[in-house]
Structure formats: C-alpha cells, structure tokens
Amino acid sequence: MTIESVSDTTDPTTHKFVQKIRFSTQTPSDNEGNIYISIPAIYGDPVNVFVSRERTSDIDFGYIQKENITMKLAIPSEYMVDSLARPVKLAMPDTSIEFNYQTEKADNSVTLRQNLEYARSFYKKDVYPGFYDFQQKYYDLKQRPIILKKKS
C-alpha cells in the first residue's frame, strides 16, 4: 500500500476526531482476477476480545464510543461491481449499541460506510449474553466484502 496523504482534524466543540487517508494499493485478486475488498482487509481488523460466552465482571470502556468509517473506492476500468451487500442495521435489544453497514455505487466508485456506536460506557455482566451475541454478529458483518469482477 502506498499512502498518498494523511490529514486529521479535531473539533473541540463536537469532540470529533476525523482522519482521512488517501492511498493506493495493488489489488488483491483471486485466480479469476476478481477483487474482494473490505474495511478490515485494508485497515486491519482489531481482535474481538469478547470470545468467551461467560463473563465474570462488568464491562467498563471508560467512555462512550462512536466510530464512523467511510471508504470510497475507485473502480478500475477493467472491473465492474459484482456484488454489494445489502444495508444492515444491528442493535442490542435495548439499543445501547448500534451498528449500521451500507454500500453505494456511483459511476466509477463504491462507497462503504460502517458506523458503530456504544451509547453507554458501562455494561453490567448480567447483560453480557446479549452483548456477546451482538459482538459476534458485528465482527461477522464488518468483514463483508465488496466484490469487483473482472470484465470479459
């Protein structure tokens, strides 16, 4: 990957940190030349630490978290979009955690958006079964690729 530019800003009023990375990369493809791209494939994927079905203590993140990732990809002229995943909304039953996933195709680009929001910083261990289920589904959904098929 070649990073062409990086910029970041912090808005003290909204407490938002925005980082923009412009990069180019060799396109990873399968034997037929098709390309599979996902946000974790480009940016890396943090490990899901919630792998145990059992929890003996509360979860305290220390702060409320909100993560919005937008990735816009230029489609090479020799490719076409083969598959875009349908939009998905995933939420805890009490809506204290929400995840939204969507993709959009324009003329020669695809935009993928993933938004994750923890409305609370503290989760009691008695809600862990629902929390665990959410985390497993979330990590599966965020792996969904955009598939670009090589034109014949």
Image: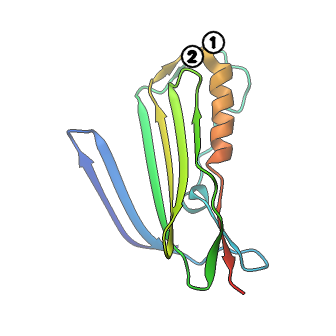
Residue 118, position in %: x, y?
47, 31
Q: In the figure, residue 78 lies in which quadrant?
A: bottom right
In the picture, measured across the screen, residue 65 lies left or right of residue 144, that is: left
Residue at x 60%, y 51% (from the top left corner): 45
122 shown above or below 144: above
Residue 111, position in %: x, y?
49, 62
Residue at x 48%, y 20% (from the top left corner): 122
- Mark 2 nearby-residue class (10 Å; few <14, some 14–19, many ≥20): few
Residue 137, position in %: x, y?
67, 38
In the picture, measured across the screen, residue 65 lies left or right of residue 35, that is: left
- Quadrant (top left/top right/bottom left/bottom right) for the C terminus: bottom right
Residue at x 48%, y 61% (from the top left corner): 71
- Mark 1 nearby-residue class (10 Å; few <14, some 14–19, many ≥20): few
Q: Secondary structure at mark 1?
A: helix
42 shown above or below 114: below
Disc 1 residue type?
Asp
Disc 2 residue type?
Asp
138 shown above or below 152: above
Q: Is residue 76 visible?
A: yes
Q: In the figure, residue 94 lies in which quadrant?
A: top right
Residue 120, position in %: x, y?
45, 23
C-beta proximity under 8 Å, tags 1 and 2? no
Q: Secondary structure at mark 2?
A: loop
Give whichever of discs 1 and 2 has the lower sequence position: 2
Look at mark 1 in the image and give the residue it sits on.
Answer: 126
The residue positioned farthest toward the left in the image shown = 13
Q: In the figure, residue 36 lies in which quadrant?
A: bottom right
Look at mark 2 in the image and give the residue it sits on.
Answer: 58
Q: Is residue 2 visible?
A: no
Nearest the viewer among 5 and 144 is 144
